[in-house]
Image: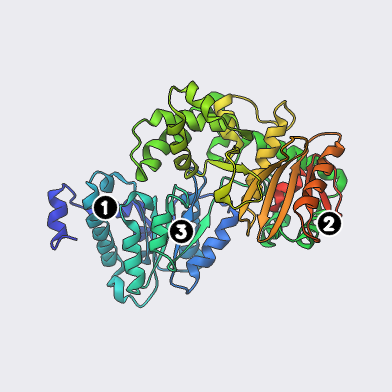
């Protein structure tokens, strides 16, 4: 940093950092938290508070796609610190690193401004940051916008400053990978997806709140059949078979509204569609991905995302897409890993029984939320519509990827094509086949496919899951459960 940062910043036209900080930290003046913030707390809030209060000295990263509520959780944590934990307001700093006051500067100068902001905070706190007798709390939103942000955090942690850093970023673990490597052993992270079905029901139907909150406290081990049976028995104590239809109604509503709360209040499909295209297609490429690589032809990335959203659950064809948008397969092959980093789409490859690096070239893409499909295709993503198969499969996939301990998700198809299983979930050495059959009358072929997989690749204690519309059988080796209840598992 410059030896005379104040004069340096004045030369850049920045004269009053205190005012900029007061705009973000009104509690410094009022000594109370007055920013409007929802009372509803996502499941991740409890985890975030636990790490914020812990004595482990690590930074906390809240990480996830755009518009999922990362800033909201940060504000809720700040309010809890001030109102419930009685932390003096001047010991808490919040700043968004995508603010124009810092983004207007050349990248080489942004670090200077960041350190000047911390120096201003020290004056407000009335203590040198390094020698404060009490823990200080520094909340940094959109941290990925600060070049080499991880080096600043690393330095303060390594020098044992009494600062608890709580940071957020609108990017995936892959985008953060190099930064996280620098912070190895110095950071814990919370991945925040769009609202899960469990959170959606708790928000819209609070009568179920106590049950769902307790359910979220019990971790389902999807690789352990006894854990899966126990989870189903716990569900059956609260949800009787004649109530499954009501939960299916909730699931259908969730499929149509999606997991991005900001979209719930938009009145028209056209408004939602425009918002999705701007926030989850264009800005992702023009702002988030450019932090990783210079994007020479962003329109290719835009078209690829739209293609993936519209065809969620289908095997993708790069030759077809290259022809549609007048580019080459090689270009799209290079673009796909970058788009996967956004966490807005996920790739599921065909099961081969081999390590991931030796996989086949066959794969499917899944949208992180069905509202993304809806925004591009204008199709109503209802579980009662013509696309209910793909919709149910996408909902199931987006829960499966949240199960703890899952190292890989693939799909199974015999070379002859006679038998298929929608998902094969690998947990340690266990492989759990999961078939989605959202239909009124179950066909025996679904059970046959699961049994065939278990015979070919299972172990003595292996089991499979058949996700149905209403059938619910808690038995081995094939556990049958309605989709709406399966979605409550994470």
Q: Residue drawn 31% across and 62% down?
A: 152
Per the rendering, the mark at residue 19 is: 1
> Badge 2 is on which residue?
237
Q: Residue drawn 85% across and 55% down?
A: 476
Numbered disc in front, either 2 or 1:
2
Colour treatment of the image: rainbow
Towards the viewer: 417 or 289? 417
Q: Residue 77, position in %: x, y? A: 49, 59
Earlier residue among tags 2 and 1: 1
Q: Residue 210, position in %: x, y? A: 71, 57
Per the rendering, the mark at residue 61 is: 3
Q: Residue drawn 47% across and 28% down?
A: 303
Give the left or right position of residue 239, taking residue 115 as reference.
Answer: right
Q: Is the residue marked by circle 3 packed among few (<14), some (14-19), or many (20+) residues within 10 Å?
A: many
Towards the viewer: 25 or 451? 451
Numbered disc in front, either 1 or 3:
3
Give the left or right position of residue 231, taking residue 1 as reference.
Answer: right
Q: How far apart are marks 1 and 3 (CA)?
A: 27 Å
Q: Distance between the residues labelled 2 and 3?
A: 36 Å
For the N terminus, the quadrant is bottom left
Earlier residue among tags 2 and 3: 3
């Amino acid at each position: 940093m410059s030896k005379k940062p104040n004069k340096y910043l004045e030369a850049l036209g920045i004269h009053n950092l205190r005012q900029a900080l007061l705009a973000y930290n009104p509690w410094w003046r009022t000594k109370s938290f007055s920013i409007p913030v929802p009372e509803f707390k996502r499941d991740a809030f409890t985890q975030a508070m636990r790490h914020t209060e812990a004595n482990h000295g690590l930074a906390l990263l809240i990480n996830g796609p755009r518009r999922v509520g990362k800033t909201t959780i940060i504000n809720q944590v700040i309010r809890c610190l001030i109102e419930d934990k009685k932390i003096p307001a001047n010991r808490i700093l919040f700043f968004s690193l995508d603010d124009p006051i810092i983004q207007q500067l050349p990248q080489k100068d942004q670090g200077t401004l960041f350190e000047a902001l911390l120096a201003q905070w020290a004056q407000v706190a009335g203590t040198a940051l390094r020698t404060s007798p009490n823990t200080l709390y520094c909340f940094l939103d959109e941290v990925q916008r600060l070049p080499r942000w991880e080096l600043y955090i690393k330095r303060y942690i390594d020098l044992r400053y009494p600062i608890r850093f709580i940071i957020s970023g609108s990017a995936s673990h892959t985008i953060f990978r190099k930064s996280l490597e620098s912070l190895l052993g110095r950071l814990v992270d919370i991945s925040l997806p769009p609202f899960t079905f469990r959170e959606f029901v708790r928000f819209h139907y609070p009568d179920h709140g106590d049950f769902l909150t307790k359910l979220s406290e019990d971790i389902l081990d999807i690789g352990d059949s006894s854990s899966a049976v126990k989870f189903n028995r716990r569900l059956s104590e609260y949800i009787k078979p004649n109530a499954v239809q009501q939960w299916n109604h909730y699931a259908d509503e969730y499929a149509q509204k999606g997991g991005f709360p900001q979209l719930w209040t938009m009145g028209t499909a056209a408004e939602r569609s425009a918002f999705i295209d701007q926030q989850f297609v264009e800005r992702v490429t023009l702002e988030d991905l450019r932090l990783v690589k210079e994007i020479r032809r962003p329109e290719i990335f835009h078209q690829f995302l739209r293609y993936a959203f519209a065809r969620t659950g289908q095997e993708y064809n790069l030759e077809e897409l290259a022809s549609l948008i007048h580019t080459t397969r090689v270009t799209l092959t290079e673009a796909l890993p970058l788009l996967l980093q956004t966490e807005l789409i996920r790739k599921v490859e065909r099961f081969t029984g081999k390590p991931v690096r030796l996989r086949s070239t066959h794969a499917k893409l899944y949208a992180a939320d069905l509202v993304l499909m809806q925004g591009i295709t204008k199709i109503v993503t209802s579980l009662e519509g013509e696309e209910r198969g793909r919709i149910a499969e996408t909902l199931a996939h987006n829960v499966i990827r949240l199960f703890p301990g899952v190292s890989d998700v693939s799909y199974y198809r015999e070379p002859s094509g006679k038998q298929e299983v929608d998902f094969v979930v690998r947990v340690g050495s266990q492989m759990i086949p999961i078939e989605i059959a959202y239909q009124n009358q179950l066909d025996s072929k679904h059970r046959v496919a699961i049994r065939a997989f278990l015979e070919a690749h299972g172990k003595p204690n292996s089991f499979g899951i058949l996700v149905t519309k209403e059938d619910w059988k808690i038995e081995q080796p094939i556990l049958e459960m309605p989709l709406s209840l399966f979605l409550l598992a994470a």
